[in-house]
Image (tube, rainbow, N blue to C red):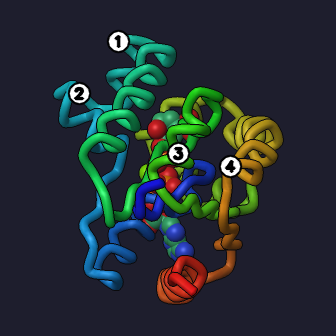
């Protein structure tokens, strides 16, 4: 097993923004799988969904994990919210490092993302319904993949980062 910290969780749980702050706090480099894919493909996640389709994007996520296993250690890695839903990725996440699940309520997701246009899966008539539906299916999978669970709904970035740093510190 490698020694990275991997942040998983639903859209809007804060994986990307917590990852950036955690990387400053722990003085470790940070990689976001969405950003990595966007750079490789020279296209936004929204355009990838629209032009190549979700399945193609999911395959890119798995390729990205394999590449990170080959090339990365001692880093913070934030992943897209749907990445843990592919069973093939579970073993890859385990190899990559310690998996931290940022657990969030549907109400907080809605509040944070209601004006956001960059999450293709939430561009629907009733985003709250979609959030509840997706989170219902995904939450047990996130729990099963996680080494550490952090409730983030009513916490500041500082509280979350300190909690993660404490939880992943070697004994
Ligand atoms: N703990 C928090 N407190 C306040 N705002 C937050 C918190 N976590 C995330 N956010 C905000 O929610 C939005 C989504 O965060 P982001 O890091 O993109 O989530 P994810 O990568 O999990 O989809 C951003 O505007 C971010 O600033
Ligand atoms: O939950 C999902 O299926 C997705 C989450 C997004 O990342 P964030 O979780 O960082 O928003 C991005 O990968 C894509 O829009 C699909
Ligand atoms: Mg993100």
Q: Which numbered tag is attached to residue 51?
A: 1
Residue at screen point 55% across, 44% down? 81
Residues at marks 4 and 3 touching, judged by CB atoms closer than 8 Å: yes
Residue 161: percent from left, percent from top: 49, 81
Q: Secondary structure at mark 4?
A: helix
Q: Which residue is mark 3?
A: 93
Q: Earlier in the sequence, mark 2 or mark 4?
A: 2
Cα–Cα gap, marks 2 and 1: 10 Å
Q: Secondary structure at mark 3?
A: helix
Q: Which numbered tag is attached to residue 83?
A: none
Q: Earlier in the sequence, mark 4 or mark 3?
A: 3
Residue 9: percent from left, percent from top: 61, 53
Q: Which numbered tag is attached to residue 43?
A: 2
Pick the front one: 131 or 21: 21
Cα–Cα gap, marks 4 and 3: 8 Å
Q: Earlier in the sequence, mark 3 or mark 2?
A: 2
Cα–Cα gap, marks 1 and 4: 30 Å
Q: Which numbered tag is attached to residue 145?
A: 4
In the rendered structure, the answer to whether residue 40 lies left or right of residue 96 reads: left
Residue 164 is drawn in which quadrant?
bottom right
Q: Does the closest atom of ligand 2 sit within 8 Å of the Cβ of label 1?
A: no
Q: Residues within 10 Å of mark 4 (few under 14, many from 20)?
A: many
Residue 146: percent from left, percent from top: 67, 57
Pick the front one: 140 or 168: 168
Cα–Cα gap, marks 3 and 2: 25 Å
Residues at marks 3 and 1 touching, judged by CB atoms closer than 8 Å: no
Q: Does the closest atom of ligand 2 sit within 8 Å of the Cβ of label 3?
A: no
Residue 158: percent from left, percent from top: 48, 88
Residue at screen point 34% across, 82% down? 26
Residues at marks 2 and 1 touching, judged by CB atoms closer than 8 Å: yes
């Amino acid at each position: 097993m490698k020694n990275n910290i991997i942040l998983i969780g639903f859209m809007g749980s804060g994986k990307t923004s917590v990852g950036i702050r955690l990387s400053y706090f722990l003085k470790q480099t940070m990689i976001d799988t969405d950003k990595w894919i966007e750079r490789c493909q020279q296209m936004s996640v929204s355009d990838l969904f629209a032009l190549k389709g979700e399945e193609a994007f999911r395959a890119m996520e798995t390729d990205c994990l394999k590449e990170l296993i080959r090339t990365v250690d001692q880093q913070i890695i934030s992943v897209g919210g749907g990445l843990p839903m592919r069973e093939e990725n579970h073993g890859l996440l385990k190899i990559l490092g310690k998996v931290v699940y940022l657990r969030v309520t549907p109400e907080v997701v809605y509040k944070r993302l209601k004006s956001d246009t960059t999450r293709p899966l939430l561009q629907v008539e009733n985003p709250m319904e979609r959030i509840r539906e997706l989170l219902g299916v995904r939450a047990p999978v996130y729990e099963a993949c996680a080494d550490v669970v952090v409730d983030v709904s009513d916490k500041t970035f500082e509280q979350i980062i300190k909690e993660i740093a404490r939880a992943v510190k070697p004994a």
